Amino acid sequence: MSAVATCCATATGTRCSANGSERVQGRVFSACGLYRENFVNFRLLSALAAVPALVAAAPAPAPARAPGDLGLVQTHLQSVQSMTATFTQTDRVGKVLTGELTLKKPGKIRFQYEKGVPILIVGDGKALTFIDYSVKQVQRWPIGNSPLSILLNPERDMTRFAKVIAGNDPRIISVEANDPKHPEYGRITLVFVRNESAPGGLMLQGWVALDSQNNRTTIRLTNQRFNASISDGAFRWNDPRRISGPR
């Protein structure tokens, strides 16, 4: 843990190296709805990671179904047990990263970035783990601290933390989600398009993550595939602090 504490000791957020790793980390954090303010006090977040994440908690009995388009989104999310997709990530200054997204409920998600980007994010159902292989850094925090938890626990009552954003195209449904009690977690706007062949009649096209400083990161998805069998092994990773070798 000493190496992690050193990486997180700066006053403005995570700073691990002067070779560009910090800039890449900032883009990755924003894309996942994980904001640099959360890492200033990493020791506190490390303690919280031991608490079961919100997405892994047992759902409340018979959650209320949201009305209208929000209800359609909830039906879609409840119909998706797994998903794979190619993602393209664009940050606020136009920098682009690509990679593969793998999702499996409950609570498992993996962002595998393109070759040459030494960053990996994995959710194991209890916490999200951020791995930077270039500096052998590992961080963990509750998935509930990320607005992405909406994708991983759709049994929650969406009317309490999400709303439909009006638009001009009736084929598109945009849903903004945030925790009103924790504005520092930022907010995320999920974009769905109506598609009869997709689960629940909707296809997730991507999302826009906005942090508490209004830094915007956009994720666009292609090649979406739903409800295929995915091994739990897809969410394992090599700890750079212990071993060397490919991810």
Image (tube, rainbow, N blue to C red):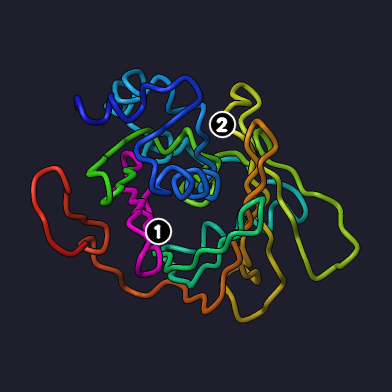
Residue drawn where x is 75% and y is 56% of the image: 69
Which residue is disc 1 drawn over?
Answer: 111
- The x and y percentages for residue 91 are 61, 53
Which residue is disc 2 drawn over?
Answer: 185
Residue 91 located within the stretch drawn in magenta: no
The quadrant the N terminus occupies is top left
Quadrant position of residue 64: top right
Quadrant position of residue 112: bottom left
Q: Is residue 79 above or below residue 130?
A: below
Q: At numbered mark 1, what does the secondary structure look like: helix, strand or loop?
A: strand
The residue type indicated by label 2 comes to Tyr
The residue type indicated by label 1 comes to Phe
Report the span colored magenta.
Answer: 105-128
How far is the residue under mark 1 from the one under mark 2?
Answer: 19 Å
Extreme residue toward the front, this view: 18
Q: At numbered mark 2, what does the secondary structure look like: helix, strand or loop?
A: helix
- Asked if marks 1 and 2 touch (Cβ < 8 Å), the reply is no
Quadrant position of residue 84: bottom left
Q: Residues within 10 Å of mark 2 (few under 14, many from 20)?
A: many
The answer to whether residue 175 is left or right of residue 24 is right
Extreme residue toward the left, this view: 243
Q: Nearer the viewer, residue 214 or 164?
A: 214
The answer to whether residue 195 is left or right of residue 246 is right
Extreme residue toward the right, this view: 168
- The x and y percentages for residue 203 are 62, 70
Q: Nearer the viewer, residue 156 or 55?
A: 55
Residue 122 located within the stretch drawn in magenta: yes
Q: Is residue 47 above or below residue 218?
A: above
